[in-house]
Every structure is written in structure tokens, then in C-alpha cells.
Image (cartoon, rainbow, N blue to C red):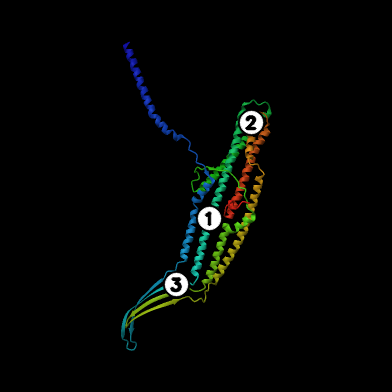
Amino acid sequence: MKRQDSLARQSVCSFRHQAVGLAALMLLVAPLRAQTHPSTNAPTPPQPVSLDALVGEIQSRHPELAFYRAEVAAARAGVRGARQWENPELSVEVGSKRVWDRGRGATLGDGAVWSVALAQPFEWPGRVALRKAIANQQIEMAELGLAQFQAALASRARTLGRSVLAAQEQAGAAEEVAERFQGLLAVLVQRDPAGVTPVLDQRIIEAHAITLSRQAAEARRAVQAGLLEINQLRGLPAATPLAIEGALTVATNLPPLSQLLDVAATNNFDIRLRQAELAQQGFQVQLARNERYPRVTLAPFYAAEKANDEQRIVGLGVSLPLPLWHQNQAGVEVAAARQQQAEASLRTICLEVERKVTEHALALETRLKEMARWRGDAPRQLREAAVLADEHYRLGAVPVTTYMEMQTRYLEALEAVLATRTEALEHRQQLELLLGCALDSFPAR
């Protein structure tokens, strides 16, 4: 009996030791599990970025901007080179001289002869100024090219951002309706169909659910494609997480067409580039005519010789080419022909800009008139009607045709609204790109 009690006490003690060891082990393992648990969580979604902030980032970080900035730097260096004088030319001559008497043949003396001359060429008056003016026009053209590229970048970024916002809204609506169909199918499957009509209704709903899933997937793919291109414009890896927030709101102010054409004629980037090119070609013609006159070289020199006696000579040499065979007539004709080409190019681009401004202004006016006929909350009311149709179809108050028609028309109307807004914003963006300024800067009508 005592032995049994002793064994019982030993087993109880052993159990207590095991329990204490197990508790200690759990206390040690718990922090490790707590540390490793967060690694299994899903990655946090990116912080949404506004479209304006995204455009500003692209305008400052796009890789190709370095090319245009280097072009501006090269043009500025060209101005410094155009106003510099040519380097003087140093010439040194060393020799020996022997003097003798021709009658007697006796050598009178011999010695060293040397001379030093420094020649500095001088351009004909006005030539350096013309070259500097040509270089200044090159700077203006380079800066206009940089500004035009930044404006085109902003326009492309806004177009992509708006397409992403529209695709996101369209994808969300399609997914919502598709989930509505899937939920309805889950209810219909549990019912016992009585006749052919319920079975056919179920198949119709199932077919529409498949179609809507396809539409939602295509919209999501459009969103992803837009985000990939935006990341490329940002100079980041294509797979960088990005989320855009905002709404497709269209401003309704549109200045008169005559005012738009006047602003475009003086502020359009292409027209300003052609005007700068024409001015540069005018300077090229003047320079070619100026180059018909020779360049003068002044060369002060010093010479010394010591043979029979010692002589030193100090003087000034002047040299210039004689314009007998080459008077740069061909250069003048080439520059004049280039000037005529620049004039024709300017006239052509003015007509093209006028056509594009008129086209986009009329298209924007048409879209604004179309949107003015809508009610402001039309998409919201259509969505509410689609939800109402779903609720009443589940209650048996509306037939399947009405239910399907409401869901389909809601998505089609939303697509039409988004497409019209996107087109209006695109025409407005193209107008601002053609005008070189924002339409909001115009006074209200």
C-alpha cells in the first residue's frame, strides 16, 4: 500500500514537471509565432494619388526630359562659342644669313636670322552679332521644344489617368451587377423549377453573369494597362503598385472660337517654333550676305638678323582674301531658299493649328450640349433602379425580361456617360495643348 502511494506521488510529481515544461515551452514559442505572423499578411495597398500630383511627378521625373535639357544646355554653349574671337596665330622663323662681296668673293660675315609674328583675324563688322543672334534663336527653339514636351507629357498623363478612372468605375459597376447575378443564381438553384420557363430564366441569368464577368475582366485589364504606361512615364518599373483617385468632372466653360484662334496663333508651340525657325533663317540670309566680304588678319611682327651688320625690323602685316572667284553667291541662294521653306512651313502649320482648334472646339461644344441634356444624378438613379429591379425580381414582382433589361441598360448608360465625359475631357485637353495655356485662364462668358 505504501509502495502504491509512493508511485502515485511520483507520477503526480512527474505530471507536474511535464506541465511546467510544456507551459514554459509555450511561453517561448508564443513570441516567435507573434513575430512570424505578420509576414503572412497580404501586402498593404498603395496610397491613392491624385491626378494632378501624378502629372507633376511625371513632368519632373520622365527620363526623356534629360535629352531636352541637354539640348538647351548645348544651345547655350553655342551662344558662348558664337561670340568668341578666333585664336591668334603665332609664327616663328629661324635661319642663318651669310654676306659676301660679289666682286672679290670674300665672305663679309654670317649670323642668325629670326622673326616672330602674331596674326589675329578680325571678322567683318556685324558678322559676330549675326552668329550670336542665330545661336540665341537656337536657345529659344530648344526651350520651346522642352516646354512642348512637358505639355505633351502632362496631356498624355491626364489622358491615361482619366482612362484608368473611367475603366475603374466601369469595372466596379460590371462586377457589382455580376455579383448580383451570381447571388440570384445561388437562390434560383435552391428552388425546385416548375416547368421550362424557370429553367430558361436561370440559364439567361447565368449567361449574362458570364458576359458581365468578361466585361469586368476586360475593364480591369484596361486599368492595368493604363497603370503600366503611367509607371513608364514616371520612370519607374512597370509593376510598381499605383492607385489613382479622382472623378471625371468636366468644366463647362468654352470661350468663343475666334478668341481661341487668336490665342493659338500667338501661343501655340508649333507656331512659335516655326516663327523662331523663320527668324533664324532670316539671320542666316544676312550672315551669308555678310560672308561675301573678306576677313581681315592683322599680324604685327618683329624680325632681327646679324651677319655683316645687325638689323631689327618691327612692322604690321595685313592680309585678306581677294573676292575674285568665290563671292558666296551659292551660300546666299541656299539661305534664301531655306528662308522660303521656313515661310511655307509657318503658313502650313498655321492652317493646321486653325483646323485642329476648330475641330476640337466644335467637338467639345457638341459633348457639352449632350451632357447638358442629362440629369446630374442620372448614373446614380440608374444604379438604384437596377438594385430595385433585383429586389422585385426576387419577390416575383417583375419578369426576367424587365430585370435583365434594367441591368443591361444601367451598364450601357454608365458606359455612355463615361465615354462622353472622357471624350469631352480629351477634346478639352487637346485644346489646351494647342493653345499652350489652360482654358480656365480665359474670362468667363
Element assignment for label 3: strand
- The percent position of residue 426, horizontal first and vertical second, equals 60, 49
Q: Work out whether mark 3 precedes mark 2 in sequence or the reverse, and give the earlier one.
A: 3
Q: Residue at x 62, y 44 (%)?
A: 419
Query: In the picture shown, does residue 288 fall above or below 419?
Result: below
Q: Which mark is residue 121?
A: 3
Q: Tell me the residue that label 2 is attached to.
A: 391
- The percent position of residue 25, horizontal first and vertical second, equals 37, 27
Q: Amino acid type of disc 1? A: Ala
Instruction: Determine the CA span between mark 1 and mark 3.
Output: 40 Å
Instruction: Determine the CA span between mark 1 and mark 2.
Output: 56 Å
- Decide: few, some or many residues near mark 2? Use Cα within 10 Å; few <14, some 14-19, many ≥20: some
Quadrant containing the N terminus is: top left
Q: Which mark is residue 147?
A: 1
Residue 278, picture quadrant: bottom right
Q: Residue at x 48, y 54 (%)?
A: 66
Q: Residue at x 45, y 76 (%)?
A: 319
Residue 269, picture quadrant: bottom right
**Foreground disc of the pair 1, 3:** 1
